Image (cartoon, rainbow, N blue to C red):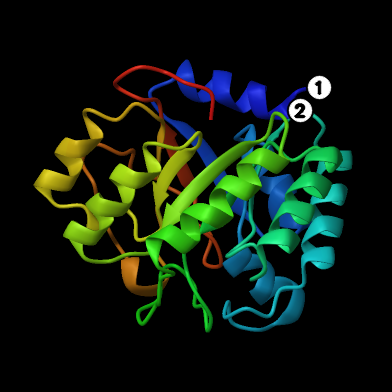
Amino acid sequence: MLYGNTLRKAVSSSPTTPLIGIYDMYSASIAAQHYNGFFVSGFGFAASHYGLPDIGFIAWPDMLAFVERLRLAFPEHHLLVDIDDGYVDPEVACHVVQRLERTGASGVILEDQRRPRRCGHADGKLTLPLEEYLDKLQLVLSSRKDMVVVARTDATEEPEILRRAAALAETDRMSSSSTGCAAWSGSARSARSSATSPCCSTRSRAGSRRGSHCPSCPNWGWMSPFTAPLVCSPPMGRSTRR
């Protein structure tokens, strides 16, 4: 089964595609009763698996083992996996992506943070130089076969968000801002209207985005205290493989 292509079709055929944040098998079993897509959250996994904050403690074999259990239990669900910064090294990022794809993950989220990293909803994040992140992203894209890749920026200032979004638009991926809809002012949201790739937004009641609201996104009645749902919207311009 081509899980990446299945997720692409779901995103392109619906105004929004909810991917509900889960952090262990129990939370996944609850979410699976209501939704057919999971966001495997790094923030939630660090808290649940290690009892530690989301500041770079996750070991990729632990995340891989969790995704393997999820795919065995939920063979038809979308699985979008947070791989943080790709575990620092570009070669490691490519290896993890290949392993996750063989395991059955639908896609991954790769952020543009540099170490020391922090949860995307926390303040004080540092970002890689754009060119360095693009090099890592292109290596990841070339290493996958069908898997969806969400390129996430943790930039917080609108001009820098837009600069990075414009550069990401030239690559073969989906685009997302980890800071959620609250970070996008009117001009940034207007850029969304001309997007040629699906856009993703994280909705959370945790961290610095508590209670954030965007009138163009659904209001979620249920939120996990550890994780956030991820909402994907199809492109309003041309559609390409991501």
Query: Tag 2, which secondary structure?
Result: loop
Q: Residue at x 76, y 28 (%)?
A: 76
Task: Please tell me how crowded label 1 is: few (under 14), some (14-19), or many (20+) other residues with Cα within 10 Å.
Answer: few
- Residue 114: which numbered mark, if any? none
Quadrant of residue 46 in the image?
bottom right
Q: Is residue 236 left or right of residue 79?
A: left
Quadrant of residue 168 in the image?
top left
Q: Is residue 174 left or right of residue 62?
A: left
Tell me how far mark 2 sits from mark 1, CA to CA. Answer: 9 Å
- Decide which of 190, 85 is in the foreground and name it: 85
Q: Amino acid at mark 2?
A: Glu
Tag 1 or tag 2, which sits nearer the N-term? 1
Residue 108 visible in the picture: no
- Residue 76: which numbered mark, if any? 2
Q: Position of residue 89 (x, y in %)?
A: 67, 68
- Decide which of 231, 239 is in the foreground and name it: 239
Q: Quadrant of the N terminus?
A: top right
Query: Tag 1, which secondary structure?
Result: loop
Q: Is residue 127 above or below residue 195?
A: below
Quadrant of residue 190 in the image?
top left
Q: Position of residue 167 (x, y in %)?
A: 34, 46
Q: Amino acid at mark 1?
A: Met
Q: Which residue is mark 1?
A: 1
- Decide which of 47, 7 is in the foreground and name it: 7
